[in-house]
Image (tube, rainbow, N blue to C red):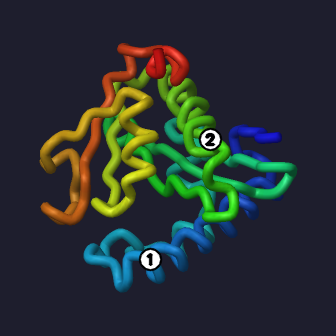
Amino acid sequence: MITVLRAESPADIDAVRGLMRDFNRWVMAEIAQTDNPSIFAQFDAELAGLPGRYGPPSGCLVLARLQGEPAGCVGFYAHDPATVEIKRMFVPPRARGHGVGARMLELLLSQARAGGYRRALLSSHHSMAAAHATYHRAGFSTVPASADFPGVVAGIDVCMSLALDGRSSMSEART
């Protein structure tokens, strides 16, 4: 059983903090001394201050659980008054293949729409094909790097964008 909710309680925030630490370890092991060191700039401060920029009113932090155990996290923060930037999407290897990422993204995008945002942006390492497929199924399009994506490395990071006034749910994106 998968449950997906806004991470608001101290226990949920601690679970997200643990998942983000797992994400950091996974990236360093799988992507080997990441090509973009800025990805983890101020990471310890970000974890200590959670929910920080991912908190209300202009942010959202989502936690997924699989059989009651933490199974994924993702958040957004206001990039500008009309745009959110999605960050820290992670599903640990043990929870992959259950649709956790798609379920988290569905809730996250619905929260962004409810907040009146009109566009979502994200960047991801070029090697994360499964994540890219999830984003594309949700309606994201790959776009060129621009000033909207500070810190990305051309040829290493994949930039994506979604107009939030388009599709209203992941299920519509699949039809």
Task: Using a 10 Å C-alpha cutoff, classify the residue at mark 1 as few (fewer than 14 neighbours), some (14 to 19) or many (20 or more).
Answer: few
Q: CA distance from mark 2 to mark 1?
A: 21 Å
Say if mark 2 contacts mark 1, CB within 8 Å.
Answer: no
Location of residue 12 by image quarter: bottom right
Quarter of the image where one finds residue 1: top right
Give the quadrant of residue 153.
bottom left
- In the rendered image, the vertical position of residue 5 relative to residue 68, given as above or below: above
Where does the image place residue 32, in percent across and percent down from the top left? Answer: 37, 83
Q: On the image, numbered disc 2 is attached to which residue?
A: 99
Give percent across and percent down for residue 101.
57, 44
Specify which label sits upstream in the sequence, 2 or 1.
1
Mark yes or no: residue 109 visible.
Answer: yes
Residue drawn 43% across and 45% down? 86
Q: Which residue is mark 1?
A: 30
Q: Is residue 57 visible?
A: no
Residue at image coords 37%, 14% = 165
| Position of residue 109 in the picture relative to residue 61 (left or right) | left
Q: Secondary structure at mark 2?
A: loop
Q: Is residue 49 left or right of residue 118?
A: right
- Identify which amino acid the numbered label 2 is placed on: Gly
Label 2 packing within 10 angstroms: few (<14), some (14-19), many (20+): few
SS assignment at label 1 = helix
**For this rendering, which residue is in front, 105 or 60?**
105
Q: Is residue 73 above or below residue 20?
A: above
Amino acid type of the residue that numbered disc 1 sits on in the rendered structure: Glu
Indicate whether 80 appears above or below 158: above
Horizontal side of residue 61 vs 30, given as left or right: right
Between 98 and 15, the one lying in front of the other is 98
Q: Which residue appears farthest toward the right when viewing the image?
A: 68
